[in-house]
Amino acid sequence: MVKKSGIVTILSTTTRELAAVLAKALVKQRLVACVTIMPVRSVYRWRENVVDEDESLMIMKTREDNADTVIATTQRS
C-alpha cells in the first residue's frame, strides 16, 4: 500500500466571499479535505507604494498529488 503525503497550501484572497466560493468549489471537487478561512491584515509593497489592507487567508489541506490542480484552480478564479 502506497501512503500518500498530505500538504498544506496557503492562499490569500481580497474578500471573505471569494474565499468561501473557492473553498466550497475545492471541497466539492474533492481537491482539498478542508479549508480554514481567517481574516488577516496584510502590509506589502505594490508599485512603489506601501499597501495596508484586509484580506482573507485560506489554509487548505490536500494531498501532494492534488497540489498542482489546487493551484491551477485557484489561479483561474
Image (spheres, rainbow, N blue to C red):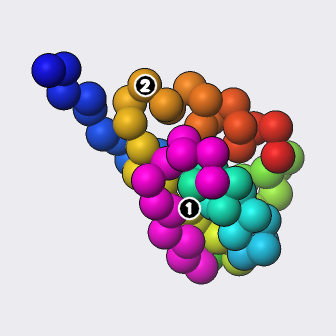
Residue 30 included in the magenta stretch of the image: yes
The residue drawn where x is 26% and y is 32% is 5
> Along the line of sight, which residue is nearer the eye, 45 or 69?
69
The residue drawn where x is 61% and y is 29% is 69
In the structure shown, which secondary structural element does the residue marked by tag 1 occupy? strand
In the structure shown, which secondary structural element does the residue marked by tag 2 occupy? helix
Is residue 11 in view? no
Q: Position of residue 72 (x, y in %)?
A: 69, 31
Callout in the foreground (1, 2):
2
Horizontal arrangement in the rendering, residue 31 relative to residue 48 (left or right): left
> Along the line of sight, which residue is nearer the eye, 49 or 28?
28
Residue tagged 2 = 65
Res. 58 mark: 1
> Along the line of sight, which residue is nearer the eye, 32 or 40?
32
Res. 34 mark: none
The amino acid beneath tag 1 is Met
Residue reaching furthest top? 2
Circle 2 Cα neighbour tier, 10 Å, few/some/many (<14 / 14–19 / ≥20): few
Q: Earlier in the sequence, mark 1 or mark 2?
A: 1
Magenta-colored span:
28-40
Q: Position of residue 34 (x, y in %)?
A: 46, 60
Q: Position of residue 2 (x, y in %)?
A: 19, 20
Whole-Å distance between the Cαs marked 1 and 2?
19 Å
Figure quadrant of the N terminus: top left
Horizontal arrangement in the rendering, residue 37 relative to residue 17 (left or right): left
Residue 20 included in the magenta stretch of the image: no
